[in-house]
Image (tube, rainbow, N blue to C red):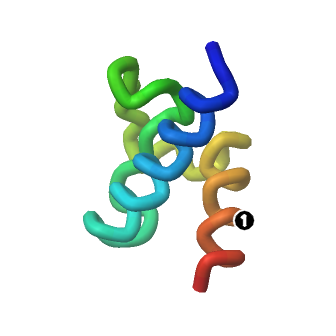
């Protein structure tokens, strides 16, 4: 996976969270074409914590 894909996937993920409400649904940080849904039961998952940190930096 290229660096560009990582960045695009991350931006898409963060924008999706902001548009749907914080913590309702999150997406894994894969490419835009390869998104995997993660249910809110994954709140304790390291991915959730990592995205949360990035979101708090944005606000």
Q: Residue at x 56, y 51 (%)?
A: 43
Whether 10 is drawn above or below 57: the answer is above
The quarter of the image holding the C terminus is bottom right
The quarter of the image holding the N terminus is top right
Residue pointed to by mark 1:
53
Q: Describe residue 10's horizontal placement relative to residue 12 as left or right.
A: right
Q: Describe residue 28's horizontal placement relative to residue 4 as left or right.
A: left
Where is residue 34? Give x, y as percent: 38, 19
SS category of the residue bearing label 1: helix
Q: Describe residue 5's horizontal placement relative to residue 57 as left or right.
A: left
Q: Residue at x 33, y 21 (%)?
A: 33
Of 20 and 40, nearer the camera is 20
Farthest residue to the bottom: give it.
59
- Quadrant housing residue 10: top right
Q: Residues within 10 Å of mark 1 (few under 14, many from 20)?
A: few
Q: Residue at x 42, y 70 (%)?
A: 22
Where is residue 12? Give x, y as percent: 41, 48
How many dots with numbers? 1
Q: Residue at x 28, y 68 (%)?
A: 19
Q: Describe residue 53's horizontal placement relative to residue 12 as left or right.
A: right
- Quadrant housing residue 46: top right
Farthest residue to the left: give it.
20
Whether 56 is drawn above or below 50: the answer is below
């Amino acid at each position: 996976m290229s660096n560009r894909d990582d960045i695009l996937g991350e931006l898409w993920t963060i924008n999706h969270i902001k548009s749907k409400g914080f913590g309702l649904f999150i997406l894994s940080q894969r490419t835009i074409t390869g998104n995997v849904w993660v249910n809110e039961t994954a709140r304790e998952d390291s991915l959730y914590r990592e995205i949360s940190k990035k979101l708090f930096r944005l606000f």
